[in-house]
Image (cartoon, helix red, strand yellow):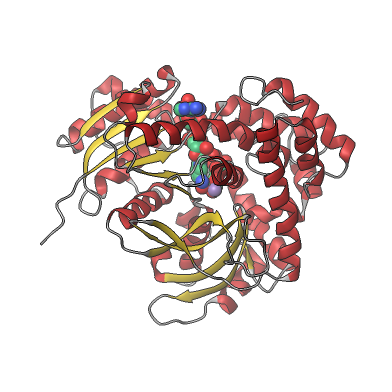
Amino acid sequence: MTDKRRFSVVIAGGGSTFTPGFVLNLIQSEDKFPLRKLKFYDNDAERQEKIGAACAIIMKERAPQVEFEYTTDPAEAFSDVDFVLGSIRVGKYHMRSLDEKLPLKYGVNGQETTGPGGMAYGLRSVPAIVEIIDYMEKYSPKAWMVNYSNTIAIVSEGVRRLRPHSRVINICDMPIDLMSRMAKIVGLHDYHDLDFVYYGLNHFGWWKHVYDKKTGKDYMPELKKYVAKNGYYVGGDYDQDTEDSWVETFKKAADCYALEPNTLPNTYMQYYYYPHYEVATANPHFTRTDEILEYRQKIVFGECARIVKEGTAKNNMWDRNAIHSEYIVEICHAIAYNTREKFLANVPNNGAICNMPDDCIVEVPCLFGANGVEPLVVGEAGRFQRALMMQQVTCEQLVVDAYVEKSYTKLWEAFALNKTVPDGLIAKKILDDMIPANKPYWPDLK
Ligand code: NAD
Ligand code: G6P
Ligand code: MN
């Protein structure tokens, strides 16, 4: 008998720049993951309205059978849902811009999810994600939350400590983006054709193996040769829409690979291996946020306004599949139909990386199914990787300590310990600048 279930999904962070692309992807995946209801939830009604009004037109034209609404009322948003997708950015781009710029004032790398900026963002996100989990548990206790709101490493540690039994899966799309590039490099269709052994922390990891899923062929030698020269940059049509800073990032992976050539690095290792280079090449007055405001945000909101004005979503810019949204639909599908497919998730280690502590959050391959995720054992981390991970994961734990204990000292320690920060006094200066800026979001630190 065929499974006739249809699902109800709420996107928390409906005003996200990724929302319309995701909606189009959900519609295109109707045969794989059918919907009965789609809702958006956001705490900024005005921002969500712009995306919501355009998506209402998309839904009416493409999926009239699916009930659609957007709201700022938690009871309405979280009642009768099967999946909550976490896509919030606490403090929005204004705070991301400060996360990037304040450290740069002191010669420290400024980045969304790494270094002091990433820790500041994580500390803002923890209470907001806990609030969303509580809404979900109150109004739809059987639902699953697939969360990709950053800083995922810190959010995952916060959830582990504060809501350890909640039905939340914290994921990241960076490895999938890179595996799509790997597939292209070795001449395969896409990342589904590759099998992998990957381990690390979020935005902090390495591939031990990359195989052909059908034949088992080992692609590491070929990939290493390519990455040593070009990083993960593919070029041509594949990269026609890749923004400049991402092109730099994909290319920089060649230098990251050079430092540790037994594995293939996640691109985020650039911030830890080469912080001086990152600072030297950054423009403290024009960071990634400024690029997004001029590019992605402008294009997404402009396209939404056009759809609303013309009253139709014909020929919209999202008709092409985006990897980010495709991946999330696949994860929901795996949970809904208990497929036990292998994806990466951020989970308590419990032996998955044999030489890391049990209670730290790691990003490892897991089987995804109706009862959540089951981590797979990946073996030992290399000596170099283990030391780096211990330093980084301790920073992430200290940020959550700072949240729970409202402790200034714990947050200072987290900043001072981070590999991107050279000195305790510099850590303190950055922290002291960040405290007033984060006042609406952080606990009062004593
Ligand atoms: P965005 O700023 O465009 O949208 C985020 C939305 O969240 C905004 O509309 C904002 O009003 C809303 N929001 C903020 N705080 C909220 C709260 N407490 N409750 C409800 N809504 C709230 O952000 P974006 O660039 O589209 O990114 C969305 C999120 O997805 C970010 O956390 C980003 O870091 C994350 N992301 C993660 C991955 C991954 O691999 N894990 C990939 C892409 C994006
Ligand atoms: C990747 C990471 C995300 C991160 C995003 C930032 O997709 O996996 O965690 O949020 O990059 O991209 P942006 O285009 O917003 O700088
Ligand atoms: Mn990510």
Rendered location of residue 299, percent (x, y)? 44, 31
> Which residue lies at the image location 18% right of the left edge and 33% below the top edge?
61
Q: Quadrant of the N terminus?
A: bottom left
Return the residue found at the far left: 1
Q: Quadrant of residue 22?
A: top left
Asked whether, in this view, residue 137 is left or right of residue 94, the answer is left
In the displayed structure, would residue 29 be above or below residue 208?
Answer: above
Q: Residue 10 placed where, x, y %?
A: 33, 35
Q: Residue at x 56, y 71 (%)?
A: 378
Q: Is residue 4 visible?
A: yes
Count how many numbered circles sit on residues in the image. Answer: 0
* Residue, far top: 46
In the picture, measured across the screen, residue 378 lies left or right of residue 339, that is: right
Q: Is the residue 5 above or below the residue 97 in the image? A: below
The x, y position of residue 179, in whole percent, is 49, 63
- Quadrant, the C terminus: top right
Residue 190 in view of the camera: no
- The residue lying toward the viewer, choosing from 442 and 252, is 442
Quarter of the image for residue 83 reads top left
Q: Nearer the viewer, residue 2 or 297?
A: 2
Query: Where does the image place residue 32, in percent across and percent down from the top left?
Result: 24, 54
Residue at coordinates 59% horizontally, 52% vertically from top-left?
Answer: 202
